[in-house]
Amino acid sequence: FYSGFILEHKYGLSNQTIPQWLWEGVKGTLVGLVIFIPLIAVLYYFLHQFQVWWWVPVGFIIFFFSILMARVAPVLIFPLFYKFKPVQDENLKHKILSLCDRAGVKVSNILAFNLSKTTKKANAAFTGMGKTRRIILGDTLIDNFSADEIEVVFAHELGHYKKGHIRKGILLGFFMIFTGLFVTSVFYRWTIPALGYKAVDQIEALPLFFLLFIIFNLVVMPIQNSISRKHEVQADTYALDITQKPEAFISSMEKLSKINLSDKEPNPAIEFLFYSHPSIKKRIALAKQRMNEV
């Protein structure tokens, strides 16, 4: 409640009332239960049936479930939280479709969604896979950014697709899921006797399993963030190259920093450990460097 409501209101980022915040929380909890209860049941089933090698089938199930969610979330889950409608600005649509044509990417849906119902922050995304692939633009982005700025913001998202980051992310996810489950399995079996548990499938021991899995993810987070920052630089470079609008890129970064209250120049250690994106200062410096190279 403090981080999601009080802190957001303290810095003027939230548009929600308490009832609205609670209702969104209830919806999120219900969706989470529908998704994760079956996964936990599957985990427990394989823990019970294969007490040593359970992590192999569980890893495959989680991996394929993640791909399924990437396909269906834009059409089944996102609409539970936001209303989507076609972008009305013909000039903006033309810029984005022209950009997609130059990139050799076919997209039929360019949708705006009412992000402003919850926050003043701005966002855009290239979501879905296959037939569910679509461009979504937050109304906060459309209302506060110029068409050129939105074009470069979307070009960045398009860069992730063109540079194969989605495919690489899936492969990295596959590796991290199996590595995480294997490492968790090893430490889980070692830790259980010391804490007085008798078997890996003992229900009372499951919180220990999740704690160990969380610790693993915290340990590898800097590695994942380093890979993510590398991909972000590649996507920024792609956006600058395909649009040839470094000034719009710089102004969009400045606006995003202001609207989202981003730290333009975080401590290097904090950036290394916790930032999935390069700092705003570094992203602007990249754009200025590209300007000088032209």
Image (spheres, rainbow, N blue to C red):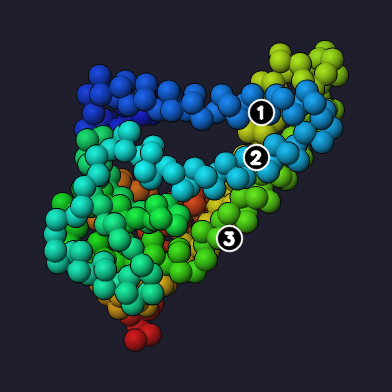
Q: What residue sits right under mark 2 in the picture?
A: 61
**Residue 36 rendering spot, x and y as whole percentages:** 55, 28
User: Which badge, 2 or 1, comes first in the chain's sequence?
Assistant: 1
Q: In the image, 11: left or right of 146?
A: right
Residue 120 vertical placement versus 236 (above, below): above
Q: What residue sits right under mark 3 in the picture?
A: 168
Question: Residue at point 35% right, 39% down?
Answer: 78
Disc 2 residue type (three-letter): Ile
**Residue 11 rendering spot, x and y as whole percentages:** 26, 35
List the single residue furthest toward the bottom: 294
Disc 3 residue type (three-letter): Lys
Q: In the image, 72: left or right of 46?
A: left
Q: In the image, 280: left or right of 89?
A: right
User: Which badge, 2 or 3, comes first in the chain's sequence?
Assistant: 2
- Structural distance between the alpha carbons of marks 3 and 1: 27 Å
Question: Residue at point 71% right, 45% down?
Answer: 178
User: Which badge, 3 or 1, comes first in the chain's sequence?
Assistant: 1
Q: Are marks 2 and 1 in contact (CB under 8 Å)?
A: yes
- Secondary structure under badge 1? helix
- Structural distance between the alpha carbons of marks 2 and 3: 19 Å
